[in-house]
Amino acid sequence: MAEAITKTNAVSTGKRLDSSDELKARVLNAVYESDRIAPLSGYKLLAGRHLTTNVGIVVIDGDFNRDAFKLAVDEIKAAGLKASRMYAYGRTGSYSGQAISFSKFEGIGVDPDAFASSTEQEFFSGYVMIDGTRIQLDFSAPPGASQQELDAAAFGALAMIAEVNYVRIG
């Protein structure tokens, strides 16, 4: 898998409008049953879609403000989801409206700082081939991450889009 992964860019995650894949996964797992949502990757805020309502689920590691709302609507439309409603999660929510169902991280038991091990992230894009089917993986890791850390991040991205199960056998 390492040959298929390429570094695409490195940027600071300071006050940007985005969230890490880890934070998105944590929010989705804290709030939704896995058979009710479809995690999405490749977006700054859009984390998934609710399967029964086709409504977008957005996560921002910061304030859900007007700029975040506009970006979320753009991403929801790009994903082909209903733009008339969204579920949003963030540290704070200074923008509201009838289309927004907002919850603070603290209200759902998620600590966003548990994922802030580095202020910079490198972004990777790669794939896994399973029985001739190509599965795209997009993920991030701290600069200088080891191969083991990259593999763990890639596996985490895979686990967001595929069911992964295992049991202890010894």
Image (tube, rainbow, N blue to C red):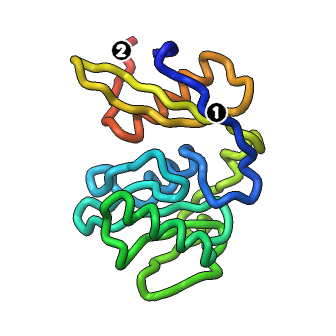
Q: Depth-wise, is mark 1 or mark 2 nearer the camera? A: 1
Picture coordinates of residue 107 (x, y %)?
Answer: 57, 70
Q: Residue at x 27, y 20 (%)?
A: 130
Which residue is label 2 attached to?
Answer: 169
Picture coordinates of residue 51 (x, y %)?
Answer: 26, 59
Give left or right: position of 137 versus 143. left
Picture layout, residue 27 above or below residue 142 = below
Picture layout, residue 132 above or below residue 140 = above
Give the SS element for disc 1: strand
Give left or right: position of 56 versus 26. left
Give the SS element for disc 2: loop
Give left or right: position of 144 versus 8. right
Give the tally of numbered discs. 2
Which residue is label 1 attached to?
Answer: 141
The three-letter code of the residue at mark 2 reads Ile
Binning the other alpha carbons within 10 Å of mark 1 as few (below 14), some (14 to 19) or many (20 upward) gives many
The circle drawn on residue 154 is none
The three-letter code of the residue at mark 1 reads Ala
Point out the image quarter for the N terminus.
top left
Picture layout, residue 91 above or below residue 165 = below
Q: Residue at x 45, y 70 (%)?
A: 73
Binning the other alpha carbons within 10 Å of mark 2 as few (below 14), some (14 to 19) or many (20 upward) gives few
Q: Which quarter of the picture shows residue 56?
A: bottom left
Mark 1–mark 2 Cα distance, whole angstroms, equals 31 Å
Q: Which quarter of the picture shows residue 123?
A: top right
Q: Residue at x 26, y 51 (%)?
A: 35
